[in-house]
Amino acid sequence: MADEALKEVELLGQCTPHASLLPLLGYCVEPGRPSCLVYPLCNGGTLEDRLKPHASGAQSRLTALGWASTPATLSWGSRLTILRDVARALEHLHGQRLLHGDVKPSNILLDAGGGAIHARLADFGLARMAKEREQAAPGASVASVSAVKGTAAFLDPIYLQSGVSTELTDAFALGVSVLMTLTGLPTSDIKQRCRLMLKFPDTPDRWLKPGVPDEAAGKWDGASAAGLAEISAGLTDQYEEDRMPFAEALQKLEAMAVAVEVVDIAAATVGEEEERCCIICEAAPREVRFACGHALVCRGCLPVVVNKHRQCPSCGVAFGAHPVAEQGDHVRAAPTFVLPA
């Protein structure tokens, strides 16, 4: 674990900061102690959990982040800008000859601030320096699936055959992530279920359920839905020479984000602020921050938590002699979690 953590620290140290990359704040790899990497808390959850909040484990993870109830479904406009942010992050990494190696919705973290949902690409455990893809000599054996690293549904067939990851590897994974974000479907057999969408991306009338835009995201702009389908099809094509260049995919995402003028993001942020109520009574605002750093309950419910539960309802840390770090009206507008002083 220490070697893996050091590798991640080293690679991130070679990368200049970017607004859509989760920054490393600190680390500890002291011999004889558990390795620890410290990143900012993104209280919007992961893109995967927000696309499928009722899936196994999603609700508990969102609750741990301070959500008193299931958050509102991400609008199609928010999904578009999230994908644009991730593409920007990958362009920045690739410009420095770095590959992420595990692009997927569960590694895309969301935060809300300034009236917009902002996405950050996270988890650099499989990041590596990029290499030029080598052509296998005739008759040479190819790498087995067990020799490559990543998440199966997002692994590029070209990578599986060559065993050498390039920018194409990340781009393919982004293409699958785009398809998931557009349709709201899980990865299981997703390309087969969306085969008509991928075959005819510019002809939505030929698409058939379940391979259609996710209705939970609201009434999609037709051009934006078709554009995302085109990007997904282009980045995941079977043959390298037929794939959409990544720069073109990013350009399309940027143009769509500007063209649709995503105005519903501010409304989504308001919805998140409304969720900041006490997780016990779900009525009064949160006015108490525990010593562990979580602000989850109102002052009226504080005795119940301290005397009955005797531990933080989010992280489970047992209360000591002084369970409360601060309380008052000012906690209402503060972040759900802050690092203890």
Image (tube, rainbow, N blue to C red):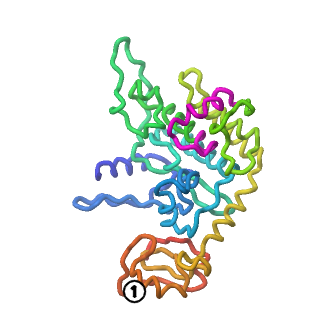
Whether residue 53 sits left or right of residue 159 in the image: it is right
Coordinates of residue 322 in the picture (x, y in percent): 39, 86
Residue drawn at x 71%, y 36% as measured from the top left? 226
Secondary structure, mark 1, is: loop
Q: From what the image shows, is residue 190 above or below residue 3? A: above
Q: Mark 1 points at which residue?
A: 322
- Picture quadrant where residue 224 is located: top right
Whether residue 260 sits left or right of residue 142 in the image: it is right
Coordinates of residue 90 in the picture (x, y in percent): 54, 42
Residue 183: in magenta span: yes
Instruction: Tell which residue pokes out farthest to the left in this image.
Output: 32
Residue drawn at x 41%, y 39% as measured from the top left? 150
Question: Which is the main secondary structure of the residues drawn in magenta?
Answer: helix
Do we see residue 18 in this rendering? no
Q: From what the image shows, is residue 211 above or below residue 31? A: above
Q: What is the span of residues highlighted in magenta in the rendered image?
A: 178-201
User: Of 191 and 155, which appears nearest the observer?
Assistant: 191
Residue drawn at x 50%, y 84% as measured from the top left? 326
Look at label 1 and name its amino acid. Answer: His
Residue drawn at x 68%, y 61% as measured from the top left? 268
Q: Quadrant of the image for the C terminus?
A: bottom left
Whether residue 253 sits left or right of residue 18 in the image: it is right
User: Of 5 and 154, which appears nearest the observer?
Assistant: 154
- Picture quadrant where residue 284 is located: bottom right
Coordinates of residue 158 in the picture (x, y in percent): 46, 26
Coordinates of residue 188 in the picture (x, y in percent): 50, 39
Do we see residue 50 in this rendering? yes
